[in-house]
Amino acid sequence: MRVTFRQLKGVIAAAKHGSFSAGARDLSMTQPAFSQLISALETSAGVHLFDRTTRRIQLTEVGAQFLGMVERPLGDIEDAYLFLRDIAAGKRGRLVFSSVAHDFITSALARFKAAYPNVAVKVLDDPSATLIGRVLRREVDFGVGAIVEPHKDLLFRELLRDEFVAIVQDESALAARRKITWLALRQQPLVLLPRQSSVRVMVDRQLAALAIVREPEYEAQNAIAALSMTRAGLGVTILPQLILGGLNMSGLAAIRIGEPRLERSLGIISRADRSLAPPGAAYVELLFQEIGKLHVDKKAAERRTIDGIKRLRSG
């Protein structure tokens, strides 16, 4: 015997309304087709589910028992199907990703939670080396960070480029400069991050490329410690500009470093053999929108600066 989902829906609809015609409307069927649907089920089972009169229908005793057996499971199946539809639309599910903390990360996350309140979210604040390991081990859906070395098992989608700057104590002579050269930095005591940090790897490579081979005077465990040591006048630190947005810069000045400029590429890091689930894809889309807003805001700020200079000159 083969029972279809539609036949079961038909039994429930007919019992609910006490009418084949009303049941047919529920299933968007003609009444003859609906009657045939129920008759086929009864013929297959070898039992009548409904007593029919010219005016109405009524469940038989067997039909009432059958309805009680299928009504709840069928409702559960429909709930399960709606759950799958919500998952596909990104309205439910779970999102786990790893990221270095940045304002655009949290701005996108706030928008995501407003749009998808039923999605459980877990964010791990990791340095890039840890982040990449989590992605490779499938502990997270994706990461937002930098890749120093390409990896055959990873995909990378660039979000933006982040320029490295020199951070100095605001009372030092260097603070008055608009730019500083790498050769000038060679003369300064350096406060750098640990060797396992992707930031440190990139700074060391840049120094080596310019034949500046030296060890830093101080090695800080994180950016907060590096800024604290710099604020105390122990040396100069070199950090990506975006990191500074969420940190205490009181008593400090950021100076651009002259050519060759050092930049890192920040982006979405995911496994090459794993596509993003709908919640992850929806959040990534919001991230790209936030980056678009950053570019617009930056251009507007540059325009205001140029206009201000023009007004000063004309005055």
Image (spheres, rainbow, N blue to C red):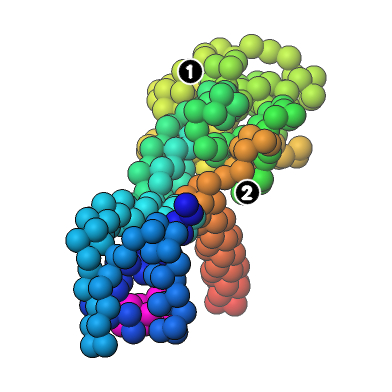
Q: Does residue 177 sit above or below 196 in this rendering?
A: below
With 126 as the anchor, is 310 left or right in this view? right
With 309 as the anchor, is 122 left or right in this view? left
Residue 26: quarter of image: bottom left
* Residue at the (41%, 28%) spot, across then down: 224
- Characterize the magenta stretch by its predominant secondary structure: helix
Residue tagged by mark 1? 220
Comes first in the chain, label 2 or label 1: 2
* Residue at the (32%, 80%) spot, across then down: 20
Question: For the magenta stretch, what is the residue range?
Answer: 22-29
Find out whether residue 253 is within the magenta segment.
no
Image quadrant where one finds the C terminus: bottom right
Tell me residue 67's x, y (percent). Answer: 26, 59
> In 3D space, how far apart are the residues under numbered discs 2 and 1 (Cα atoms)?
26 Å
Tag 2 secondary structure? strand
* Residue at the (48%, 18%) spot, across then down: 220
Amino acid type of the residue that numbered disc 1 sits on in the rendered structure: Ala
Q: Is residue 15 visible?
A: no
In this view, the residue in front, 16 or 89, is 16
Tell me residue 139's x, y (percent). Answer: 50, 28
In this view, the residue in front, 230 or 204, is 204
Tell me residue 186's x, y (percent). Answer: 68, 22
With 143 as the anchor, is 53 left or right in this view? left
Residue tagged by mark 2? 160
